[in-house]
Image (spheres, rainbow, N blue to C red):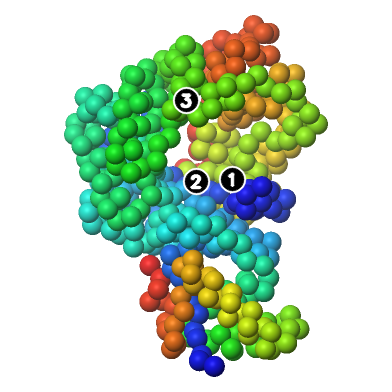
Amino acid sequence: MTEIYPARSSRIAARLLGGEMMIMSVADSTFFTLNEVGTAIWQAADGRTPLSAIVRREICQKFEVDLPQAESDASIFVTELSRHGILVIHDRPSALSSENP
Amino acid sequence: MSLLAEMNGKALALGIPISVHLDLTFRCNERCVHCYLDHEDHGEMTTVEIEALLLQLAEAGVFFLTLSGGEVLMRRDFFRLVEVARSLTFNVKVKTNGVMIGEKEAGRLRQLGVEQIQISVYSHHPEVHDAITKLPGSLRRTIQAIRFLKSQGLKVTIANVLMTRNFSDHSGVMALAKELGAAYTLDPTITPKMDGERSVLALRIPGSQLSQVFNNQELVGDVEHFCAPPPPPDEEIMEGYPCSAGHTACYVSPYGDVFPCVQFPLPCGNVRHQPFLEIWQHSAQLREVRSIRAKDLTVCSGCSHVGTCTRCPGLAYMEGSMRGPSTADCEKSFQRTGIPSANMLRGSHVSPGQLVQIQPLPEARPQ
């Protein structure tokens, strides 16, 4: 499996509200909320950590989910968020700061 | 219910200030005839103070941050402050007159990820707009700014404050907004000046013209629905609170004073002397504002409009009581539906006496 490195986009506004992450795309004002698991992935998406490591560290350990299932769900999740431009997927480690204003 | 409304409900339940309006300065390069501000600098917060405040606001859970003034670009550190705000992942909206926005500034706003820019336009006729702003050439420069911002793909809203001097121009401003690809919003609210001086209220459009606005399909959409008589208030309405001021939103002045809203001049604390969250959670004034339900309103609780009126608690406070009526909103409800408000029926629908306006806390003054 090819490793991917998700990074939070700088073209968003985000805030944690009662355990859920509110995210608004600056580009089109689309508004999202992420549940606890999605929030954990989002917060760990620093562009330097591979998705597989995020899944192992943030999902499997904290939410008691099987690794294969968690990897599959996380892959779908980050792909979906990248389609809306709120996560950027890199194929190699990338500094988050380069994405920031 | 929309996701955004759901989040607002959650913020309300958790006591989170999800929206903050921060005026960076009261200084301005225009001198609009209806403006309520004193444009002198009485000791604005420094760059360092505002940066520290932004961090506190982020930690308090603020998501929507409106940066306004005065004219925000009068501050030399404006872009630095926007940069800090965006690095803290606020949703940033900027209110400006646009006069100081050129191609470079528009590009910077886009680069920083500002979500929306609201620009005041009073008329599509330069002689009317410029006479209101008292800055020759201002309409031309404002329109140019909108073009620069739109060329960057930014969202722009034209705010059209309606008063006696520009009443007949709202259709022209709306057409201008359409031509420029900007959204349009109209506001007939004129508030007293900061020092309580009320001569600007003479600029308010009279009731007959308000009625024309409310019956204009272009402005309100479904006129029949918009002007329908209010339904009888139920328990949910009577247990409801008037607006978000002090509940999920507040205002911070350039001097660090915290108020429930930019239009609600009840000083609640100063961030130069207390952490923001301490003011938000423990201010006696904010607690009082939060305690008020529709059933507690002295006159309005018995008014047929109580569930649909745009009653502004800040304007009511300026008229003497945050639990009392706001006569400007009584007029709006009447002109919209043809049904007099309870306040009008009791015969006290007259101009109030001395009004209160935004005043800093005494201890907020620099020594």
Q: Which residue is at 55% across, 15% downward? A: B335
**Left or right for B354, reference B69:** right
Instruction: Give me the residue at 23% from left, 35% from top.
Output: B138
x and y, in percent, of residue B90 in the image: 49, 59
Q: Quadrant of residue B32?
A: top left
User: As rendered, which of B267 and B349 lies closer to the eye?
Assistant: B349
Q: Residue furthest bottom?
A: A1
Alpha carbon separation for disc pair 1 and 3: 31 Å
Q: Which mark is residue B21?
A: 2
Q: Are marks 1 and 3 on the same chain?
A: yes
Q: Give the amino acid type for the residue marked by disc 2 in the picture.
A: His
**Residue at which label 1 appears:** B249
Residue B217, disc = 3
**Which label sits on residue B231?**
none
Residue type at tag 1: Ala
Badge 3 density bin: few <14, some 14–19, many ≥20, Cα 10 Å: few
CB under 8 Å between discs 1 and 2: yes
Q: Residue at x 69, y 27 (%)?
A: B307
Q: What chain is tagged by disc 1? A: B
Residue A96, located in which quarter of the rendered image? bottom left
- Residue B43 is at least partly visible in this image: no
Mark closest to the chain's N terminus, 1 or 2: 2
